[in-house]
Image (tube, rainbow, N blue to C red):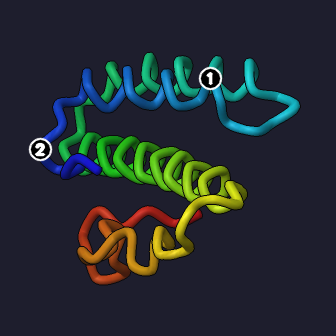
Amino acid sequence: MERLEQLTLRQLYRGILQKARTYPSKNREMFRQAIKQDVRQWKTLTDEMEIRKAVKKMRMLYGHLQMWDEKMKEILESDDPNLDKDNIIDNPLPRRDINQRGDDDFVYF
């Protein structure tokens, strides 16, 4: 997985929309439209802290969708009876979580 901090905002946005195409949801299209609407609203932000929070939300969403993709690959590969069972992802994100409670731009859900 790419380092989230190194992705540009455009790469994050495009990656999110691309990964959202296959996300398992009855409301997939509404999910994608909500992402587009949020990003349009974030473009108008002027407060530095709000911008940092918006970027963090994008990174968290990208990470969530990426992890779902990785987990689905793991599951699909593990269903293959001829495949060695050593392909399990034990620690997919060895780095620290990007949303820490002590951060100035901590995002509450």
- Label 1, label 2: how far apart the Cα atoms are: 23 Å
Q: Secondary structure at mark 2?
A: helix
| Residue receiving disc 1 | 21
Residue occupying the far left of the picture: 6
Q: In the drawing, does residue 49 fall left or right of residue 39?
A: left
Where residue 108 sits: x, y (%)?
A: 52, 66
Q: Nearer the viewer, residue 45 or 92?
A: 92
Judge whether 37 appears above or below 38 on screen. Answer: above
- Comes first in the chain, label 1 or label 2: 2
Which residue lies at the image location 39% right of the left edge and 78% below the top edge? 91
Residue 62: give its label. none
Towards the viewer: 102 or 23: 23
**Residue linked to disc 2:** 6
Q: Relative to 50, is 107 on the left or the right?
A: right
Residue 86: where, in percent of width, then height? Answer: 47, 75
For badge 1, the amino acid type reads Arg
**Image position, residue 69 (x, y; %):** 54, 46
Q: Are marks 1 and 2 in contact (CB under 8 Å)?
A: no
**Label 1: which secondary element:** loop
Label 2 is placed on what type of residue?
A: Gln
What is the crowding at mark 2: few (fewer than 14 residues within 10 Å), some, or many (at least 20)?
Answer: few
From the viewer's side, name the closer residue of 10 and 51. Answer: 10
Position in image of residue 46 (x %, y %): 23, 30
Q: Which one is closest to the eye, mark 1 or mark 2?
A: 1
Q: Quarter holding the C terminus?
A: bottom right
Q: Is residue 103 above or below residue 21?
A: below
97 up-or-down from 5: above or below? below
Quarter of the figure with residue 13: top left
At a point 52% along the width and 31% down the height, the residue shown is 19
Question: Residue at horizontal 26%, vertical 26%?
Answer: 11
Q: Quadrant of residue 96?
A: bottom left
Residue located 68% across and 55% down the image: 80
